[in-house]
Image: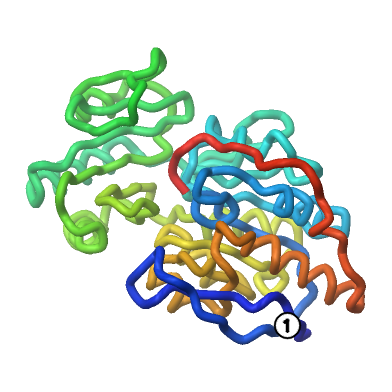
Amino acid sequence: MTFAYPPPQTPESGSRTAPSAPLPSAFARSARTRLIATDLDGTLLSSDRTVSARTVAALAAAEEAGIEVFFVTGRPARWMDVVSEHLAGHGIAICANGAAVHDLHRDQLIEVHPLAPEDALAVVEALRAELPEVAFAVERTDGFSYELDYPVPDGWPTPDCAIAPVEELLGDRAGAPVLKLLAKHPSIDPDGFLATARKVAGDHAEFTRSSPVALLEVSALGVSKATTLARCCVERGITPDEVVAFGDMPNDLAMLTWAGTSFAVANAHPEVLAATSHRTTSNDEDGVARVIEAILEADNGGEHSGAHAGGGGEHRARGGAK
């Protein structure tokens, strides 16, 4: 099925903020869309971490048309209030890069794929041996903890944060299951940091990144946005060809490669722009909403879906992983 949508744009090579250029205005799907999977930060959310009224309306229109919507993010479940405020039917979030599935309606984790403490400690040892300045933080199902040298936003620590050496934070009695380990370096090139980590510790865990700085997100081997999304789709009898996915950073690559149709927003990382089958406008230009509107219009035989008619203002999100 081929249809037109508003001309997408892409940044100049190597730049995430450069002016964008128009691309082809049509794309083909081999099957009718049954599920939309979208990243949040840098993709669905605007740069000020808000959800536009147009995007809210497009998501609601998709679900009214029988298309499921999954939010697939590096964020922990506690940072999902940005979308849970206007859920409509969409109530599933794949969080922490696939390590958890969260029922937003019930505010409950329904699936967890933890990183074993021994594997996390092996990663710490390998990275510290190669790059002594690395500092670590730990994301568990019940909260966040970090080393004293790990940089945190203004206003932290919060009362529910523990501060201690990472070896102590990962101790057997330290708490709930570990969703991901975070590794931050003060000065190294982010892509080089990712390559080094995979080289020295890739036998112990999965490594990815979603930040413009040298911050790595570490999950259990075999856990990614793609693996958890694929499992959820199998449970629903949905094939990859029936999935349209959106993303902007390396932690989206596996999901975008797995989905039958994939879109990079114009502000995406160069690797994502190269790997996806299609591109749309930037996150600040309602890139995801534009494609959803086009899907609905094509499925309705060219009738306007009404997704762009939504009113209201923007909806602000908390900062966090993508």
Q: How is the image coloured?
A: rainbow
Q: Residue at x 30, y 35 (%)?
A: 117
Give the number of callouts.
1
**Residue of label 1:** 30
* Above/below status of 190 relative to 167: below
Q: Nearer the viewer, residue 250 or 9?
A: 9
Residue 98 visible in the snapshot:
no
In front of the other: 144 or 140: 144
Q: Position of residue 195 (x, y in %)?
A: 23, 63
Binning the other alpha carbons within 10 Å of mark 1 as few (below 14), some (14 to 19) or many (20 upward) gives few
Find residue 104 and report its horizontal and vertical position in percent: 68, 35
Dot 1: what SS?
Answer: loop
Residue 194 seen anywhere in this rendered image of the structure: yes
Does 60 sit left or right of 213 as displayed? right
Name the residue located 23 percent from the left edge and 43 percent from the top edge.
184
Residue 4 versus residue 291 in the image, above or below: below
Residue for point 56% across, 37% down: 317
Q: Nearest the camera: 69 or 51?
A: 51
Quarter of the view holding residue 235: bottom right
Q: Position of residue 38 (x, y in %)?
A: 61, 57
Q: Which amino acid does label 1 sit on?
A: Ser
Q: Is residue 237 left or right of residue 240?
A: right
Locate residue 82, reporting x and y percent. 61, 37
Name the residue located 46 percent from the left edge and 55 percent from the top edge.
224
